[in-house]
Amino acid sequence: MMDQFKVWLLALAGLCYVIAAVLRWRALAQDAHAPRPWLLLATGITAHVCATIMAVASSGAADFTYAALGSLLAALAMLVGTRFMAVHTPGLLLLPVGIMACLVAVFAAVDRSYLSDDIEQRSLLFYVHIIFMSANLAAMLLASAAAGLYLAVSWQLKAASHRALRLPQLPPLAHLAQRSLLVALAMQLGGVVSGAVAIHPESDFSPWHPTVILACVAIIVMLFLLSVHALQRIGWRGLCWGIMVLLMVEVAALVTLMMVDAHG
């Protein structure tokens, strides 16, 4: 019963984030003084925190805990951190977090067998690995949110839309996306190293597991994007499109993590 309840709470949080983002996007093209969906955001954060606490407190659900914690960190970063980065539209930034939370809840509702995985006997390094990967997911969601909003603002500016005048400016979004990508790379590397150290000799770990392969692909793509951008081979727009592609890799990795047998 508790496992099912935390899944529904995560689904509720995701729906609140998505609805809040849609309402905010529509409001930007209408009344200049339209109220912001703070009630939806507060409800989503509350449900998200409760779902994460329940996941952490349980003896199983390592994959669910990783997804819930990572998306919660991203949501909090968007609501708090953007206040200091001249990006004052956290409701829009929460769209990828909402989609990710709904995706995790759907897979958890379809196949709940992994929720009973016992993690009580795991080593401390395993929890370090979970923390690193959760932070990576949070940073990746923040980077993709900023990149997606950057592309949306660019499109609105080209279309001479009234909405473009009330969206965040491009430079803060671009720098937020780049810095978040750097953090995501650092956390991904930390997660890979801690995960490798935490592997038991008797475990059935395989380097050909889909999650492991996709994690390596993600690292290569991150390094490539940051390198070519530093060399000025691609601009901010190209970097943002690359981040959106990278998000698809992260989503695929999360899906394989939840639907395929454990990788270690």
Image (cartoon, rainbow, N blue to C red):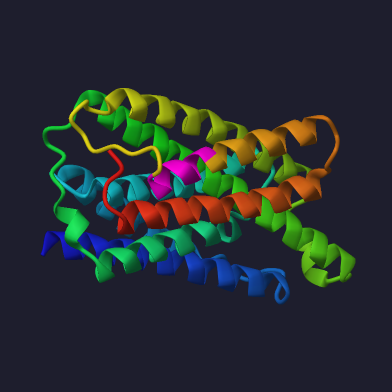
Residue 126 is situated, as x and y percent measured from the top left of the image, at 26, 30
Residue 168 is situated, as x and y percent measured from the top left of the image, at 73, 53
Horizontal relation, residue 238 to residue 129: left or right: right
Residue 261 is situated, as x and y percent measured from the top left of the image, at 27, 52
Q: Across the whole image, how many numbered discs are drawn on residues? A: 0
The part of the chain drawn in magenta is 209-216
Q: Residue at x 65, y 73 (%)?
A: 27
Quadrant, the N terminus = bottom left
Q: Taken as a whole, is the magenta stretch helix, strand or loop? A: helix
Q: Is 212 inside the magenta-drawn segment? A: yes
Residue 180 is situated, as x and y percent measured from the top left of the image, at 60, 38
Which of the pair 239/166 is nearer the observer? 239
Residue 252 is at least partly visible in this image: yes
Which of the pair 201/186 is nearer the observer? 201
Q: Residue at x 72, y 53 (%)?
A: 241
Q: Residue at x 33, y 36 (%)?
A: 130
Is 87 placed above or below 25 here? above
Is 23 placed above or below 146 here? below
Q: Residue at x 27, y 38 (%)?
A: 264
Residue 88 is at least partly visible in this image: no
Horizontal relation, residue 159 to residue 98: left or right: right
Q: Quadrant of residue 8?
A: bottom left
Q: Is 173 inside the magenta-drawn segment? A: no
Horizontal relation, residue 28 to residue 101: left or right: right
